[in-house]
Amino acid sequence: MKHSLKKQIDSYVSFKQWYIKILQDFNFNYQKDCEAREFLSRILEEKNENWKLESVLLSFKSLIQNKKRIFIYGCGPSLEETVDYMIKIQEKKKISNAVNLVADGAARLLIKRRISLDGIFTDLDGITKENFDKAKYIIVHAHGDNVINLKHFKSEIINFPNVIGTTQVEPVENLVNSGGFTDGDRILSFISSLLLPKHELYLIGMDFSHIVGKYSKPEIRRNHKASPIKLKKLQYALQIIEWLMSRIKNPAYIINSNIISDNFKNLTLEMFKEKILDD
């Protein structure tokens, strides 16, 4: 393949050192990641012959570059309060004028609040089949622990037109390795090469704290304390986002969260209101 958007987005080489560190630190199985990649690749081969990865990537790029603000939603405990505040102050007008990209289960809240979703980034453990077609694009990730989920969603992946498949090992022709570890930081990894100087990034429900938000899994009914391994994953996610932001240079804001970082400007809800209603 000559110059292509897939090649532009692929970050296998630049992210490889992170991946090796994660493999070692979590004792993950590289071979299982490869098997998951092959499984998702075979599912995508069953899609309608009109489905072409490059075409879907190009249309996704157009969607991203058409708007100034990009809202990235995680499943942290501040998600619900922040989203409800956004709806209250702006009657969804500014939300619809931004690109809305959600990490996995955060989609369930936005669907419930009738907010239009541009993309769901998911390893399929935070959404249900009923959520699958509620976004313009679904970016499905394959890793060693989610082959069962890939099987469960096989029909949805085959039938939904705007699917993009991602992997965390060396990508094959119909998959992208855009870097990233968790669904949240994978969003930023995926869009990093698509950003224009005009873009502003807003991280919503991205708390990376010891409390896990109730939208992280469908079966969870309330926020709860993170397990040691979950907290470790969240800490990695924050480190990866900070690494990405040191390379991206676009203005980035983290909303209604206690995270302290030189790479973000923290905005309270009131500051967020002033910022997004400014134009």
Image (tube, rainbow, N blue to C red):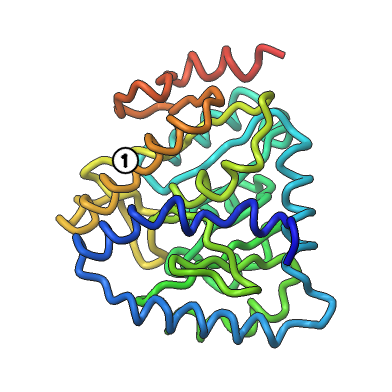
The front one of 153 and 81 is 153
The front one of 51 and 248 is 248
Left/right placement of residue 197 relative to residue 222 reads right
* Residue 90 horizontal/vertical position (percent): 65, 25
Residue at (40%, 20%) from the top-left corner? 266
Residue farthest left in this picture: 228
Residue at (48%, 15%) from the top-left corner? 270
Label 1 crowd bin: few (<14), some (14–19), many (20+), radius 10 Å: few
Left/right placement of residue 132 relative to residue 186 reads right
Left/right placement of residue 212 relative to residue 57 reads left
Q: Is residue 136 above or below residue 155?
A: above
Residue farthest right in this picture: 50
Query: Where is the N terminus found, in terms of image quarters?
Result: bottom right
Q: Is residue 261 above or below residue 166?
A: above
Left/right placement of residue 7 relative to residue 270 reads right
- The answer to whether one can see residue 91 in this image is no
Q: Is residue 249 above or below residue 224?
A: above
Residue at (30%, 61%) from the top-left corner? 20
| Dot 1 amino acid type | Gln
Query: Where is the C terminus found, in terms of image quarters?
Result: top right
The mark total stands at 1
* Residue 95 horizontal/vertical position (percent): 66, 34
Which residue has dot 1 on it?
239
* Residue 83 horizontal/vertical position (percent): 52, 36
For the residue labelled by badge 1, is the local secondary structure a helix, a strand or a loop? helix
* Residue 252 horizontal/vertical position (percent): 50, 26
- The answer to whether one can see residue 273 in this image is yes
The front one of 128 and 138 is 138
Residue at (56%, 30%) from the top-left corner? 201
